[in-house]
Amino acid sequence: MDDDALRRALRSVGYRCFIVYKDIFLDTSIPMDAAAHHLHITEKRWSIGGCLMRLGQTGTLFHLKNRDAISPARMSYTDPVF
């Protein structure tokens, strides 16, 4: 995954979402359905499908780039989620 693909993936998840919920994304003991339900309850305007997409995308990010993905998200001044 090159840097442009990483930035696109982070934008699709949302920088704020990625940083705020990174502990849930990294915790492999939480089933994906339970994590999606938690995100859906916490962020009222996100659909379950949107939550599942975010979980899947962040899983891919961490798997491919390990923790390098956190750095560009922290440096961002924009928040595509809102």
Image (tube, rainbow, N blue to C red):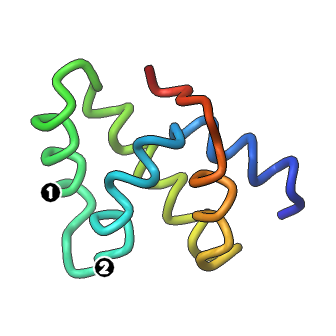
Query: Which residue is at a point 53% across and 30% down the rendered structure image?
Result: 79
**Screen quadrant of the C terminus:** top left
Query: Which residue is at a point 51% across and 37% down the rendered structure image?
Result: 14
**Of pointers 1 and 2, the one earlier in the residue sequence:** 2
Residue indicated by mark 1: 34
Q: Is residue 82 among what the camera can see?
A: yes
Image-based side of 43 in relation to 49, left or right: left
Residue indicated by mark 2: 28
Q: Give the label on residue 18, or none.
A: none
Q: Cα distance, mark 1 to mark 2?
A: 11 Å
Image-based side of 43 in relation to 9, left or right: left
The amino acid type of the residue labelled 2 equals Thr
**Screen quadrant of the N terminus:** bottom right
Q: Residue 50 location in percent, x, y?
A: 38, 32
Q: Residue 5 location in percent, x, y?
A: 82, 50
Q: Residue 51 location in percent, x, y?
A: 33, 39
The relative height of residue 63 versus residue 52 in the rendered view (above or below) is: below
Tell me the quarter of the picture where residue 12 sits: top right
Which residue is nearer to you in this view: 72 or 34?
72
Which residue is nearer to you in this view: 41 or 16?
16
